[in-house]
Image (cartoon, rainbow, N blue to C red):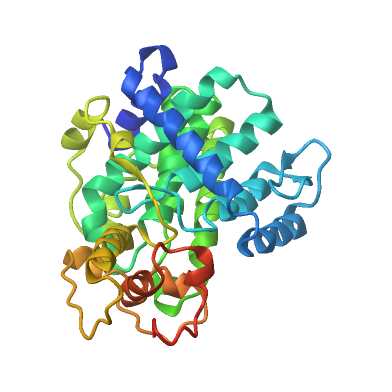
Amino acid sequence: MSLSARLGQFVAQLEADHLPPDVLQKARNCILNGYGIALGCHTTPYAPVARRAALAMDGERDAGATLLGDGRKTSVAGAVLANAALFHGRAQEDTCGAGHFGTIVLPLLTAMLEVHRLPMDRFLPALVAGYEAGGLLEHAYSPSSTPSGLRASPLYGVVAAAAAASRLLALDARQTGAALANAASFAGGILQSFEDGTDEWRYQVGVAGRLGYVAAQLAAAGSVSAPHAFEGRAGFVPVFARTSCDVEALAARLGRDWSIHRVTFKPYPVCAFNQTPVIAALKLRERIGGRSVARLRVRMNPFEAGYAGMDATGPFSSLSGTLMSIPFCIANTLCNGTPTVRNMTTYDDAAVN
């Protein structure tokens, strides 16, 4: 049986009553963290850009999905694009390995529930489905795909979105497998925006959510989709991870090694890979007691240190640049203490630079 079929069976059978209590609690924590961070992103400039684009494409709709922080309504796909940029605004979203699935799945499920009037008891299983499908692939293949310049969030997130949407729509196992196969064909997303300090990465998550929704709706409408979309010779895993796909090994983890338990919540508005350097810098700041630092050596995992934008030294002109830069995050923390969006966007601080 193919991976899309195995995943389709797993996702279609998820029920809140049958999920372990700790899995359900972690899902609730993800909801609280996701909406809470989104509330703290209303002043960021990225969601307004995405709202304008969504309204230009899909228009305003009386019976649509709400554009959070705005109040107008548009299509599900439009709301996902705009609201995901809000959830991703501070770069303080949840992290599952190298993927930020909460910024994709939560805006999608929120919009779908509002427009389609679906039962709320499907919400938690659908959320878990997203983290499990996306997390399974991210854990197995991100170490191979990310060094090639592919970003985990949109690459694996479109699969997460398709799984979540399929479960919320109550698609059967065959349809869900087709949705996941569709998602495998739609996936992608590069890391260059981090290298250049630009904002595409904030919109990638919304695009992934839209594509996952399209993948599920196509499957519901009867799409004929590649059964070997993940493991086939020209499939998702060989193409993006440049390796073979062990279907049985992956399927054996489903329902046993829950990916949602790998989700962590960022304490600071910086890249996930800069959380530990910032924590270490805060401790060092206490120890040095205001003394100046002439030189500092940082040792990091090569996977993290080699991620796009991590070695940038400026000059900086965007939050997208500073939150990725290891040198900036450490220098800013040593000089100013706990990172905030305000001091992360002070680009001309002579002490930091």
Query: Percent from the top left, x then y, of residue 199?
Result: 53, 69
Quadrant containing the C terminus in the rendered view: bottom left
Q: Residue furthest top?
A: 17
Q: Is residue 256 left or right of residue 42?
A: left
Q: Looking at the image, how many numbered discs can be counted on the residues?
A: 0
Q: Quadrant of residue 298?
A: bottom left
Query: Percent from the top left, x then y, of residue 299?
Result: 15, 70
Q: Nearer the viewer, residue 197 or 239?
A: 197
Establish if 192 lies above or below 276. Answer: below
Q: Is residue 325 left or right of residue 125?
A: left
Whether residue 154 is visible, yes or no, is yes
Query: Percent from the top left, x then y, of residue 48?
Result: 69, 60
Query: Percent from the top left, x then y, of residue 221?
Result: 59, 33
Quadrant containing the N terminus in the rendered view: top left
Q: Quadrant of residue 352?
A: bottom left
Q: Is residue 38 left or right of residue 296?
A: right
Q: Nearer the viewer, residue 353 or 71?
A: 353
Residue at 45% across, 50% down: 93
Residue at 54% across, 42% down: 36
Whether residue 224 is visible, yes or no, is no
Q: Is residue 174 left or right of residue 42?
A: left
Residue at 59% across, 53% down: 86
Q: Nearer the viewer, residue 160 or 299?
A: 299
Establish if 243 lies above or below 173. Answer: below
Establish if 92 lies above or below 262. Answer: below
